[in-house]
Image: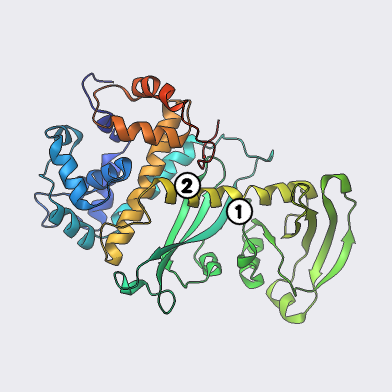
Amino acid sequence: MLPGRTVFAQLMDHVSQSKFRTCVARYNGDYKASRFSCWDQFLCMAFAQLTYRESLRDVEACLRAVQPKPYHVGIRARVARSTLAYANETRDWHIYADFAQSLIRTARELYVNERLSVELADTVYALDATIIDLCLSVFPWARYRRHDAAIKLHTQMDLRGSIPTVVRITEGKCPDVTFLDDLVIEAGAIYIMDRGYTDFERLQRFADEGAFFVTRTKRGIRFRRRESRPVDFATGLVSDHIVRLATAEARRAYPGLLRRVRYIEPETKKHFGFLTNKLTLPALTIAQLYRSRWQVELFFKWIKQHLRIKAFYGTTQNAVKTQIWIALSVYVLVAIVKKRLSLDLSLYKLLQILSVTLFEKTPISTAVFDVAPKFDEIDDCKQLQLFEL
């Protein structure tokens, strides 16, 4: 590491500028942008995410206050609130969506050998969606209910490393299950989803593509039992049946065999009914796999708590999507740095340290070593933790 470089500059060393330029060229993002490039925009918005800036005016004031340090990071233009606002509103958000996907591919390669909560060699994905509430008078294009506005974040997460692999941003009233329509299904992978995704015509795609799903059953679905398997009642399992859908309409949508596992959570005594086309795994593993779906819920709560995706710097659809995709890029980038530098602390603490040392001229590992002990005195037991060690 070269001496005298800021933590922010070192962080951006883990970003491939050639891939970024490819994404910009794909959408002609720097057309007539001689003074404030897409790279300048990305760095300014990444700074805003890492330091929890409240507004674009706040971003402008902070970056001007530390001149000339932003220049050495790569921000060549003089930052102005109006310029940044215009860039967020007009430059295609697909630039930052494509770039986030390139970071995601890098992160998945780094976390490919991470252990799951269940001993499996298969790739396991969790699917879910979350609502981000907006003000209808400020965001009229995002009408959700009569007096409310919202957008929905549909996500597929790789449970090895808690890395979001597919993200789709839609209007708030878009049903969760429609996310399956455009999903590229990976043969041999296991997809874990809630009962909102139980649509047998769509689930048949998983069987056709050689993939597996684990979901919860809905009330009113009728089955015909074909086989009963023994279970260990001491583990909380109630039953393990091989079934077929009973009604003619349901069988037309999904003609194959299914497996229904009933389970009682030992601690809460809550009853669960799981449905899967994975016929070979132990019944208890099916229940444990579904429990691991909580990681995607944790991801949603974590990014809402620690990144700027609930309050937005712009009001247009393009500005909102740009901010969300850059926030996700920052999340994945910090995860990459944590893995590459083998940093022995939680992602939450790493983000906190970066926020106060961003323009310090010290290696990231040294900054973490110097500052991390101070965070040990802070009781963060209620913080939502990802990448726990």
Q: As displayed, is residue 291 above or below residue 108? A: below
Q: Which residue carries the number 1 mark?
A: 187
Secondary structure of the residue carrying tag 2 is helix
Q: Where, by quadrant of the figure, is residue 119 drawn? A: top right
Image quarter of the C terminus: top right
Res 336 seen here: yes
**Nearer the viewer's eye, disc 2 or disc 1?**
2
**On screen, residue 347 above or below 293:** above
- Name the residue located 47 percent from the left edge and 55 percent from the top edge: 166
Q: Is residue 342 left or right of residue 85?
A: right
| x and y, in percent, of residue 80 in the image | 12, 50
The residue type indicated by label 1 comes to Ala
What amino acid is labelled 2 in the image? Trp
Q: Is residue 66 left or right of residue 183?
A: left
Q: Position of residue 76 (x, y in %)?
A: 12, 40
Instruction: Give the residue displayed 35% in from the left and 20% down from the top.
Output: 366
Name the residue nearer the viewer: 57 or 162: 57
Residue nearer the viewer, 137 or 157: 137
Q: Quadrant of the N terminus?
A: top left
Query: Which of the numbered marks, if any, corresponds to residue 302?
Result: 2
Quadrant in the picture for residue 343: top left
> Which residue occupies the foreground of this view, 172 or 311?
311
Disc 1 crowd rating (10 Å Cα; few below 14, some 14-19, many 20+) is some
